[in-house]
């Protein structure tokens, strides 16, 4: 569980001044595991924080990316989405539900890096690999076979 003190510490470590809007936006981003857009975050916080505008949410999220508190996530839906998890990880993009979920698999990462090393790509030094796996979410209720 992330506490308010943790959030304040993170902002301070990133050399950001602690403001009310930064606190609520960062907290909302940490709680959203689905890699939200600025609009999504705005929807989550606007009721309790009517003074925070959508423009502020956009600017604040971009600031978080600038200071490495968050990452931008590229996805095939062409939406600008954000990730509070700044560690190296893969994403599974669920096309039918438009969710992005984290996928950690160090073995897969190593296999791909080893494979690319063997290929000896000219003038290219591979630093890391991040995958986006496109998939569809399967609704368990629908996949139950009828007897
Ligand atoms: Zn992620």
Image (cartoon, grey):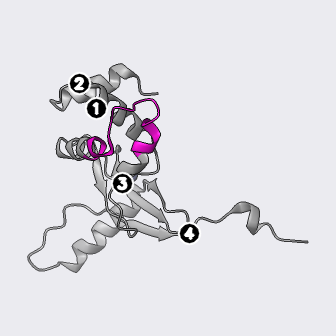
* Image position of 119 with respect to 35: above or below: below
Identify the magenta region.
41-58
Which element type, helix, strand or loop, lies under badge 1?
A: helix
Which residue, given by chain and number where applicable, does mark 4 sit on? Answer: 136
Q: Which of marks 3 and 2 is nearer the N terminus?
A: 2
Q: Is label 2 in a helix, a strand or a loop? A: loop
Mark 3 → mark 2, Cα distance in angstroms: 28 Å
Foreground mark, 3 or 1, reads 1
User: Mark 3 = which residue?
Assistant: 89
Residue shown at 16%/79% (left/top)? 121
Q: Does the Cβ of the disc 3 residue fall within 8 Å of ligand 1?
A: yes
The residue at 32%/63% (across/down) is 74
Nearest to N terminus: mark 2 or mark 4? 2
Relative height, residue 140 to residue 16 (above, below): below
- Under tag 4, what secondary structure? loop
In screen coordinates, is 64 left or right of 76?
left
Q: Residue under circle 2?
A: 18
Question: Which callout, 3 or 2, points to the residue nearer the camera?
Answer: 2
Do labels 1 and 2 touch, CB within 8 Å?
yes
On residue 22, which mark appears? 1
Q: Which of marks 4 and 3 is nearer the N terminus?
A: 3
The answer to whether marks 4 and 1 mark residues whose Cβ atoms lie closer than 8 Å is: no
Front-lying residue, 113 or 145: 145
Q: Distance between the residues labelled 4 and 1?
A: 34 Å
Who's the residue at 19% across and 61% down the image? 127
First in sequence: mark 3 or mark 1?
A: 1
State yes or no: residue 27 in magenta. no
* Magenta-drawn stretch contains 48: yes
């Amino acid at each position: 569980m992330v506490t308010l003190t943790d959030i304040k510490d993170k902002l301070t470590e990133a050399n950001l001044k602690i403001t009310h809007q930064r606190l609520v936006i960062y907290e909302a981003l940490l709680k959203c595991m689905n890699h939200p857009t600025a609009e999504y975050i705005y929807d989550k916080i606007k009721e309790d924080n009517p003074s925070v505008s959508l423009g502020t949410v956009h600017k604040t999220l971009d600031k978080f990316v600038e200071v490495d508190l968050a990452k931008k996530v590229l996805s095939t839906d062409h939406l600008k989405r954000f990730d509070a998890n700044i560690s190296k990880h893969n994403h599974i993009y669920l096309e039918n539900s438009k969710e992005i979920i984290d996928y950690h698999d160090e073995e897969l990462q190593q296999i791909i890096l080893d494979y690319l090393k063997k290929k000896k790509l000219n003038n290219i030094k591979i630093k890391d690999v991040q995958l986006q796996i496109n998939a569809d979410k399967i609704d368990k209720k629908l996949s139950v076979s009828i007897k």
